[in-house]
Image (cartoon, grey):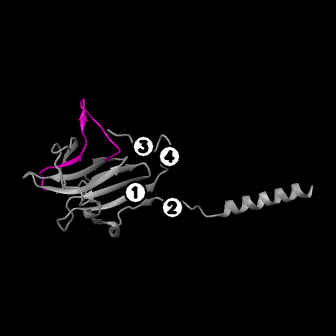
């Protein structure tokens, strides 16, 4: 009887200790309107990837949107592109693609906001709605098997240069059916 009682006591102590332990998982990184989190877009540019133009040299996947990002009444073209071969009209995704996002103005000059190779991942881009005293910005959702983050880029900031901020970043479980992002 003493052995059973001791086992139950040990089990109870173990449960109490486990319940009181701190959760080792990091909190999601969520930033809202924090000026000290704003950075230059160079943090999101891999200089080993040459600047590309959608449709040229294998950069066959492209999506674009028009928006007045500067408030001057003239819309700029925001382009998302990935280097991928097209087979029978569909992208033939492999295990990793370089992705780029750039803003193109009327004179065809481009400002690059993002240039990264995403291993088994995808990038989605959206334009925010303008708000009173706030111009539209570019949201990029980076989805990898082990991480998801939302990057917001403003074009241009008050200093005339684009800026970016990570609005959300979270580590993900890289295992199972839900680990791989859905490619377009």
Q: Secondary structure at mark 1?
A: strand
Q: Residue at x 39, y 49 (%)?
A: 144
Q: Which residue is mark 2?
A: 26
Above or below 151: residue 183: above
Q: Which residue is mark 4?
A: 175
Is residue 106 highlighted in magenta? Answer: no
Q: Mark 3 or mark 4: which comes first in sequence?
A: 4
Query: Going 37% across and 58% down the picture, which residue do you hit?
Result: 167
Q: Could you say which disc has been placed on residue 168 in the image?
A: 1
Count residues near mark 4 (Cα–Cα under 10 Å), then give few for <14, some for 14-19, many for 20+: few
Q: Residues within 10 Å of mark 2 (few under 14, many from 20)?
A: few
Mark 3 lies on a secondary structure that is: loop
Residue beneath the point at 20% across and 53% down: 102
Quarter of the figure with the N terminus: bottom right
Q: Earlier in the sequence, mark 3 or mark 1?
A: 1
The one of 168 and 146 positioned closer to us in this rendering: 146
CA gap, disc 2 and disc 4: 18 Å
3D distance between C-alphas at marks 1 and 2: 13 Å
Q: Residue 93 or 165: which is nearer the viewer? A: 93
Furthest residue toward bottom? 36
Q: Are marks 1 and 2 in contact (CB under 8 Å)?
A: no
Q: Where 162 sits versus 62, above or below?
A: below
Residue 70: image x %, image y %? 17, 57
In space, the residues marked 3 and 2 are separated at their CA atoms by: 22 Å
Between disc 1 and disc 2, the foreground one is 2
The stretch in magenta equals 71-96
Q: Which residue is mark 3?
A: 180
């Amino acid at each position: 009887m003493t052995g059973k009682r001791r086992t139950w006591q040990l089990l109870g102590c173990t449960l109490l200790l486990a319940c009181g332990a701190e959760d080792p998982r990091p909190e999601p990184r969520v930033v809202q309107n924090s000026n000290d989190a704003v950075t230059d877009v160079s943090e999101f540019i891999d200089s080993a990837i040459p600047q590309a133009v959608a449709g040229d040299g294998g950069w066959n996947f492209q999506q674009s949107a028009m928006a007045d990002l500067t408030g001057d009444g003239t819309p700029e073209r925001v382009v998302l592109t990935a280097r991928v071969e097209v087979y029978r009209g569909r992208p033939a995704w492999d295990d990793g693609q370089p992705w780029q996002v750039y803003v193109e103005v009327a004179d065809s000059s481009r400002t690059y906001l993002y240039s990264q190779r995403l291993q088994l991942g995808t990038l989605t881009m959206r334009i925010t709605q303008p708000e009173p005293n706030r111009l539209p910005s570019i949201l990029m959702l980076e989805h990898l098997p082990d991480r998801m983050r939302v990057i917001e880029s403003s074009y241009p900031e008050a200093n005339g240069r684009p800026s970016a901020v990570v609005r959300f970043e979270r580590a993900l479980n890289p295992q199972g059916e839900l680990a791989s992002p859905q490619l377009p």
